Amino acid sequence: MTHNKLFFRIAAASAGALMLLFSGCISLDEDLRGQPTSDKFFSRVSDFDSYVKGMYTYMNTMYGSDVPYIAGAAAEDVYVTNWVARWKPFEEANINAATNPDEVTGDLWKFYYTVIGICNSTLQIVNASDLPAQDLAPIVGEAKFMRALMYFNLTRFFREVPLITEENQALAATEKDAPVEQIYAKIISDLQDAEVSLPEDRSQSEKMRPTMWAAKALLSKVYLTMAGYPLNQTQYYALARDKANEVIQNGPFDLEDNFFDLWLYDNRLTNDEFIFAYYCNYDSGDRSYLARAVRPKEGGEGGWYDWCSSEQYLNEMRAYEQEYMTEEQKASYTDGERVTGTFYLTCIDGTSYQLTEDGQPFVGKWRDGGPRNNGYWGAATINNSDTFYPVIRFSEVLLIYAEAANMAEGGPSDAAYDAINRVRTRVGLPELPAGMSAADFDRQVLNERKFEFAFECHRWSDICRRQLLPEVMKAYYPEITVDEHNYWLPKPYSQLGIWTGTVQNAGY
């Protein structure tokens, strides 16, 4: 088959689906670098490389915006400021009160399905290629890894969604919602393929692309999630434990010595903790406005102050850090490494967070947009910069192991203690006492996750899979009543007319 014929065969097979995905997802004047075009005949592996790299622009754009953080704002860490009060219903788990929830949910849906479309088209092109299969195996693994990650995010936000693959992409407009269990089966299949076909390592210039270790780490998280709501298939705790242990015992990762250093631009490519991350690059068009969005307008910061954290959450973290300290240690306590790495509490000109417009603490993790935006310590001066976003860190794999081992074995083993204590002692916290019950140890792991991964889009998923929303709302918004529908976002109303097979979630 000639390469020209190969391109036109793929283009004809998938044109309808790509038109659906892109016309409903992004404006026609955007850079559609992920689409096949007539000058890409895929005659070399580098052609495939260029094509699949396009999908990271969409993820960088989304995680460099407010969208995924506001979508999970009912978790304790995110506080929506007065400046964007229209998003407050997301924080209050009362999305029916939002005037336009599509402003958030629409972008989630569009960007995730756009990347799925690129992955599906990649697999179609590979299937029709006459290049050696072993040369294209890493491309296949990358497409399946990213497709799995997109569906993992989609089903955790929206529950049942259309399951579009390379086989039915042409029918995407009318594909009905797939059961959650079927979506997870596809996620597992894709990740199992990815872990045997992705490379073991990447160069610094390719750090934004997944490795076999990223596939294993993500698979452990998928198993852990399947053990909770809505599937509640507790046999997956053992699988999550074992897969996490593969990464812990055999992978090249470790905790960084200093928690604060993880969030500095200069260390983004060299730390040993990021297993998979998105890296914005202003010069290539992968730009993030988050470093400006999380700063206050006043205090010399030059920010937009879209969202921050809350003093209540900050104080909960401080109390948590002192939980197993001696009375003498508590008496001399000052903010620990995790607090200072997670927040910043004083503006450039010395103004305390308490004297700013909303009087709430600021997000430190996403503050450093690189030298183009004056780094961590300087004022934000441009809208977009070179922020980075870890999707999964080694500390999460340790905590996945601790939680899953405890639940699978009916109590904490020495190995489970060791895993959580590594995360605790890295930030200067005392080790947990021996002899904890399974329930107490489980509570501790969930709290460790709650504070270790602040603002990293993990806490909302934890609240959902462990059905913690009533107690969270009771602590923050006791007047709000929640039920099962509050664990899911409404599907974007603007997309229901395009995806005619999908059905709105109950309660919306």
Image (tube, grey):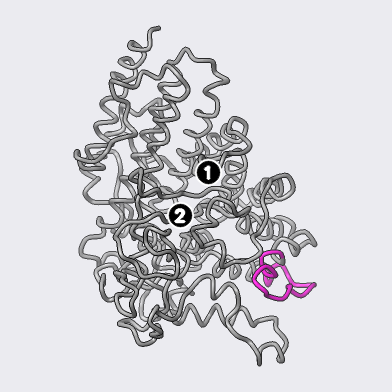
Q: Residue at (59%, 48%) from the top-left corner?
A: 223
Placement of the C terminus among the 4 image quadrants: bottom left
Query: Residue 4 appears at what percent x and percent y?
Result: 33, 12
Q: Which mark is residue 207?
A: 1
Residue 408 falls in image quadrant: bottom right
Which of the pair 487/33 is nearer the observer? 33
Q: Residue at (55%, 43%) from the top-left corner?
A: 204
Q: Regarding mark 2 in the picture, which secondary structure is present there?
A: strand
Query: Residue 288 appears at what percent x and percent y?
Result: 35, 55
Indicate left or right for 143 with 118 as reference: right
Kind of residue sitting beneath label 2: Phe
Pick whichever of labels 2 and 1 is earlier in the sequence.
1
Residue 325 falls in image quadrant: bottom right
Q: Regarding mark 1 in the picture, which secondary structure is present there?
A: loop
Kind of residue sitting beneath label 1: Lys
In the rendered structure, are the residues bearing label 2 and label 1 in contact, judged by CB atoms less than 8 Å apart? no
Q: Which mark is residue 388?
A: 2
Query: Residue 64 appears at what percent x and percent y?
Result: 37, 55
**Was residue 433 drawn as part of the magenta stretch in this picture?**
yes
Q: Is residue 47 above or below residue 9?
A: below
Q: Is residue 365 above or below residue 136?
A: below
Indicate left or right for 385 with 412 as reference: left
Q: Is residue 252 above or below residue 314?
A: above
Q: Write down the region rendered in magenta.
A: 422-440
Which of the pair 234/287 is nearer the observer? 287
